[in-house]
Image (tube, helix red, strand yellow):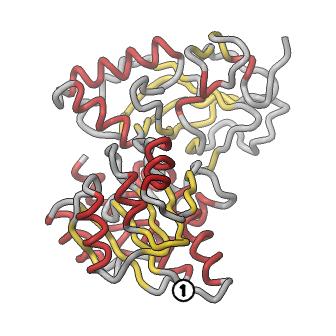
Amino acid sequence: MSSSPVGLHRVLAPSGVLPQAAEKLDASPGIWPDEVRIAVERLNLDAASYRQLAEAHGGDGTAIRRAVLDIIETRGKMQNPVTGSGGMLVGVVDEAGPDSPLGVKPGDRVATLVSLTLTPLQITDRLREWDGEGEQVPAQGHAILFARSIVAKLPDDLKPELSLAVMDVCGAPALTARVVRSYVDKGIKPVVSVIGGAGKSGSLSLVAARTAGAARTIGVVPVQQEKERLESAALADVVTLADARDPVALAKAVEDAGGPADITVVCVDVPGCEHGAVLSTAAGGTVIFFSMATSFSAAALGAEGLAADVTMLVGNGYVPGHADYAMELLRAEPGVRGLFESRLAED
């Protein structure tokens, strides 16, 4: 058997599926000529996945840690069986096969820009340095990257934890900017609403929208503390309070803030926000779903039921140049950096 650039040779079950859809991957450390082995330093769990695990285990860090270990040991990767999502990791290149096209060499500190749901992963330290009470997970072990994987070298001027947090969500601002520019190129300066505007992907998306030429940016948050935090960071023209799971309340809040939105960006990590996103978007507008908690059947059927003429996009996490672009936004906007650093301090 030869290696596959997309990792088919690492799929143990069921046969014939891609690594992301597999129930179990081969995470053995020996590499094929086009693979790269990473010595793992830290995992960053997807926000929706961590929230689900925390709720399922009543916030018990020990139980959460045990659940994550069980998933990795059972599946050979980190893929939450409930949410289907994973996260990403940082580490140091341990070995690079002679045919690998990824452009990294042993000793490079890197972040993987592909999901843990398709990355062969083995943990060797039982996650003993992690208390289970945050999305960032100190870890020891190894991960395998394929020829078609995406990886970025970590910048020297930022702490690895900060770089990891940014790269985990770097697809969101890049796609937001692309969509906003598509409106501007047609002579339309859009109103952009970001649901979950105080979070990692949300705060970067607000800055990206403003930088790309939005006429007005609206940050939607669920609680007063996040409203104050986002207002202090000065990333949105207006910050409004609303429960995104209440479609009518969300639509009214966005309208009162200067909407409806031409572009709505969904960056929350809870389910049930699809109908509110559609209802608060103008006819002919665009909804971008970045949350792994999104039910895409609920979004499609909800839009049909509301007779809503909106374009719905799935943020797949990859846009060419997305990591460099997100880092540029972080460096240029003190408000974003402050939000990220405060969240890391809390974790």
- Describe residue 344's horizontal placement relative to residue 225 as left or right: right
In the figure, residue 139 lies in which quadrant? top left
Tell me where residue 237 appears, x and y as whole percent.
Answer: 34, 83
Q: What's the amino acid at mark 1? A: Lys
Q: Nearer the viewer, residue 280 or 257?
A: 280
Q: Is residue 340 visible?
A: no
Q: Residue at coordinates 23% horizontally, 20% vertically from top-left?
A: 63
Residue 111 higher or lower than 11, as above or below: below
Q: Secondary structure at mark 1?
A: loop
Tell me where residue 210 appears, x and y as whole percent.
Answer: 47, 80
Q: Is residue 194 visible?
A: yes
- Describe residue 114's horizontal placement relative to residue 277 as left or right: right
Q: Residue at coordinates 57% horizontally, 71% vertically from top-left?
A: 177
Quarter of the image where the N terminus is located: top right
Residue 3 higher or lower than 51, as above or below: above
Tell me where residue 295 appears, x and y as whole percent.
Answer: 44, 41
Q: Residue at coordinates 56% horizontally, 53% vertically from top-left?
A: 315
Q: Nearer the viewer, residue 244 or 333?
A: 244
In the figure, residue 106 lies in which quadrant? top right
Residue 240 higher or lower than 272, as above or below: below
Please name the residue that numbered disc 1 is placed on.
189
Residue 40 higher or lower than 242, as above or below: above
- Describe residue 290's horizontal placement relative to residue 314 as left or right: left
Q: Residue at coordinates 18% horizontally, 31% vertically from top-left?
A: 59
